[in-house]
Structure formats: C-alpha cells, structure tokens
Amino acid sequence: MTSIRDFLTDDHRRCDDVFADVEQAVADGNWALAGDTFGRFSAAVLQHFAVEESLLFPAFEQKTGMTMGPTQVMRSEHVQMRELIAAAGAALAAQDADEYAGNAETLLIMMQQHNMKEENILYPMCDQHLADESAELLPQIETGLAAAGK
Amino acid sequence: MQAVLSFDQAPPFAAPFRFFVTAPFFALIAGVLLAVLGPEAFSSRWTPGALALTHLLAIGFLLQVMLGAMIQILPVVAGANLFHPLVVARVVHPLVVVGALALSAGFLGMADFAMPLAMATLATAAGLFFAVAAASLRGIPQTSPSIGGFKLAMLGLLVTVLLGLLLAGGLRGYWSLPLIELTQVHANWAFGAWALALLSAVAYVVVPMFQITPPYPGWFSRRFGVWLLLAVLATSLAILRFDDEIASAIQMTIFALAAGFCGMTLWLQSRSRRTRPDATQKFWRMAMLCGMAACLFWALARMFPELAGWRGTPLLVGVLLLVGGFMSVIIGMLYKIIPFLIWLHLQNRGQSRVTAPNMKAVLAESRMLLHFRLHVGACAALVAATVWPDVLTQLAGVAFSVAACSLLANVFKAAGVYRRHAALVDARLAEIAADASAGSPAREMP
C-alpha cells in the first residue's frame, strides 16, 4: 500500500518538474508560456500546502498531541514560501528575468530543504503514528491534490 | 522522539558562518606560502612545504567548511540538532584555526611548541565535535542513505585525526612508528573514509535538490559508504602488513569507487532539468572531472612503472584531488549555503514585514563566475607546476592566492549585505512598532 511519505514525496517531485518548466520558458524568453506554467506551479504548490495544513497536520497533531512541534515549523515555512512565490510571480509579470531568477533560486532552496525535512522526518512520523488512519486519510489527500488539476 | 525535539530550530547564523569566513584565509595563506617557498615545496610530497600546504587546505579550508556545513545540515537532513550549536562552534572553531596554523608551522619547523600545540588543539576539536555529532545522531532513524553516510564519515574523521596524532607524536620522537606506512594509512582515511564519505552523503541530498536531477540510485547510495569504508580498512591492513603490491592493488578499489561516484554524479548532472548551469554546478562538474582525472592517472601509474616512479605522480594526484576535486566542490556548496542562510536569517529577522534580498541580490552570479574562472586558472597552474616545478611553482602560488582573494571578497561582500540589511530591518521594525503604538490612531482620523 502507498504510504503517506511516498504519496506526498511524489507530489513534491511533480512540483519540482513544473518549476523546471517555468525556468526553461523564462530562459527561452517565452513570457506567455512562462506565465501560464508559473500559474500551474503556484497552484500545485499552494494546493499541496492547503492539503497538508487542512488534512495531514491536524490529523498528526490530534493523534500525537504535538501542536507546537514539527507541524508548526512546517506551517511557518509555508508562509515564507508563499511570500517567495508571490515575489517570483510579480517579477515574472514584470518580465524581469534577473529578479525572477533570484527569487526562484531562493524559493527552490527553501522548498527543497523544507521537502527534505518533511520527507525524511515528518512523513515517516506520520506513517508511524497515523497507520490506522491512513486508509481513510490518503484518499482525502488524493482528492485534495486533484483539486489543483494534478 | 528526539527528532521531534530537535526539529524546529535552525542553528544561529553565527554558528556555521564563522567557519565560512575564516576558511578562505587558509586558501590565501597556502597560496602565499607556495609563492614564497617556490619550487622546493613541489620537489616531493614529503617536503615540509608540501605537508604544510596539504594541511592548510585539508584542515584550514576543507575541514572548517565541512564542520560549519554539518552544524547547519544535520538538523535539516537528519533532524539531528547539535547540543548548543553556537557554544560548540565557539569552542571548536578557534581550536581548528589555531590547530591548522600550528600544524603547518610545526611541519615548517617554525617553532618548537607548534606541533604539540597542534596536537592538543586538533585532538580537542575533533574529539568534541565527534562527541556532540555522535550524541545528536544517536537514535535517529535511518530514513535516508545520507544519515548512514554521515555516521560513517564521522568515524572516518575520528580515525583520521587519531592517526594524525600518532604521526605527529612520531615526528616529534615521542614514540617510534613506521611513519611512511602510517602516513599512507592516514591519507587513505582522510580522503576516502572522511572526505569522500561525507561528500557522497551530502551529494545524495544536494545534487538532486540544487540541480533537479533524478536521485542517486538506491543500490548505489545505500552501499557506497560501506564499500568505501571496507576498501579503506582492507588497504590499511595491507599497508600495515608491509605488503606494497597487495596494498596498491586493494587501494585501486578506493580509486575505482571514487571514479564511480564522480561518473554517477556527472551522469545525474547531465540529466539536470535546470536550464543553464550556474556557478555551483560548474564547480561541481569541475570537481567530478578532476576526481576522475586523478583516479585515471593513478590507474595509469600502476600500469606504467616509469609513471609510478616519477616524483610528480603523488603531487599531481594530490593537487587534482585536493584542489581540483574537494576544494572546488566545497566552494560550489558555499555559494549556495551562504546566500541562502543570509536570506533565511534576514527573512526571519524581518518577521515577514521587511522583505529580505533574494539569494542573487546577496551575492551576484557574475561575482561567483569570475571566481570560478580564477579557480580554474589556479588549478591549471598548479597541475602544470607539478610537471615543471622550477618554472611554474611561484606563478601557481600567485594564481592560487588571487583566486583565494576573489573568494574572500565574495564572502565579505555577502556578509556586508547581511550586516547592512540587518540594521535596516531593525530600524524599519522599530518604526513599525512606534507607528503601531503612537501613530495609528492619529492616522485613522479624517
């Protein structure tokens, strides 16, 4: 059976792929395509955050009683990434390639170190603590992510 | 549950950064020393100059950056937070700085107390860091191959330092030991079981992450560190049994593993989804190509006795591994870690009210690319100097110093951005606080 870790890790990789597509479009100077692709990227990432914050984190917090632990850190990193996505989106709208590159690079590193914490630490903990609930939780997560057209 | 407790705190900025600021000075000292010593330093790997230069770079540059980076990366990759990272950094950092300088002074015979001072400081630093890192990694579940790799690398560091202590004591005449053989064992542990083991553990994480490549295959990343340790152990035993032929044959497995790692990394990088290689990727590629060249040259030296007997062979392989390989890759990592940490800490300081400059605004790509070109030139000069030491050693020393200055300028440029922006953030937050307490009711009035 698919674990929470495998499922959400796959979604991280899908977001990475779209990120690379935007970069490619910017490098080609195709601003229209870059804008569309960035829209898809931003929708995918924000939906991923929303699913975690509305489904996974509350389930974990309820089961373990840890409300100020790792989930809190992940939430605050989501806030930082939302700001970077907004800044990168604004640079793209202004067709400022350098400004986009700087914000996108920062977002990429922030996103990757965040993913690493989730994939290596938080998701394995979720699989461990939410073993009984995952049969119910995973389809909900899947439906939630599908809402972003993934 | 240890992972939970240690999960939420990035170490304070000053903990890793102090290592990153002083490390480039050691590259500069090494360059100046080479220019001053001239051809004599490159006449054999055993000259005091060559030994001093090797340790200025290995301890002063590589080990320093690696320690700083581990303080930062262990909590992120493994959820293993070091016990009081700032205190550990404040104790370990000066010990390593003094130790690296004293060791080089000891090799050069500059002062009688230098070698004992180096032994005391480096033993304390390594022992302390090992104890703290081991304590933080204890009980951490092995959820990624990198975590196992970190543990093996820490063991490699410990053995390397212990062997170094034995050798330094032997040089001082405290005890009698087969120094040549032990030096070979020491170098195998330093390059293989410590540096390459740590590099591979970090690479499994950062190569896919920075460059959006496929991950290292599981069969590779799960076993590479163990194979490497076994190869180093077997080589060490053969060397200590004074069986040169067998030792040299077994040592080829270390070089084969290293070449395999470089080849695998280059292959993954060729599948990167990022459009243009940035400075970090260029440093990585250069490092992997130099690593492969070193392994290839070592294999050729085993096939052709005249090459094996040539004075320059160990120097050439040493330059390719230490400067072209490990140093390049470490610089590439610094150019991601420093701008990111500065952005992260400024962003936290600004509490989402004052925006931090993005990574490329902290350190411009053009500055890093200029350093890359200077570094390539310095490496080429060093390689050529191993072949024609009389003509080129001093020039190589100057070229290496210039490249080191470029790195120093970039690190200080980034630190300046941090200082200035931190002051700006504090001033802006104070304004906002003053507005909130006094100004806002007034502003709402018509």
Image (cartoon, coloured by chain):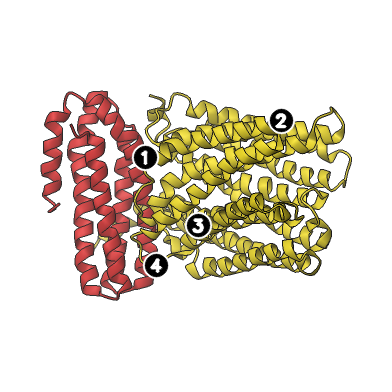
Residue at x 42%, y 40% (from the top left corner): B221
Per the image, the residue denoted by label 4 is B276
Q: Give the CA distance from mark 3 to mark 2.
A: 35 Å
Three-letter amino acid code of the residue under disc 4: Arg
Residue B284: mark? 3
The single residue placed furthest to the right in the displayed view is: B112
First in sequence: mark 1 or mark 4?
Answer: 1
Three-letter code, disc 2: Leu
Q: Residues within 10 Å of mark 2 (few under 14, many from 20)?
A: some
Q: In the image, residue B411 lies at what x, y percent?
A: 58, 59
Separation of residues labelled 4 and 2 (CA atoms): 48 Å
Numbered disc in front, either 1 or 4: 1
Circle 1 sits on which residue? B218
- What residue would you read off at disc 2? B240
Residues at marks 1 and 4 on the same chain: yes
Q: Where is residue A63 in the image (x, y as percent from the top left)?
A: 22, 24
Q: Color used for chain A?
A: red
Q: Are marks 2 and 1 on the same chain?
A: yes
Element at label 1: helix
Q: How crowded is mark 4: few (under 14 residues within 10 Å), some or many (20 or more)?
A: few
Chain identity of mark 4: B
Q: How crowded is mark 1: few (under 14 residues within 10 Å), some or many (20 or more)?
A: few
Q: Is mark 3 on a helix, strand or loop?
A: helix
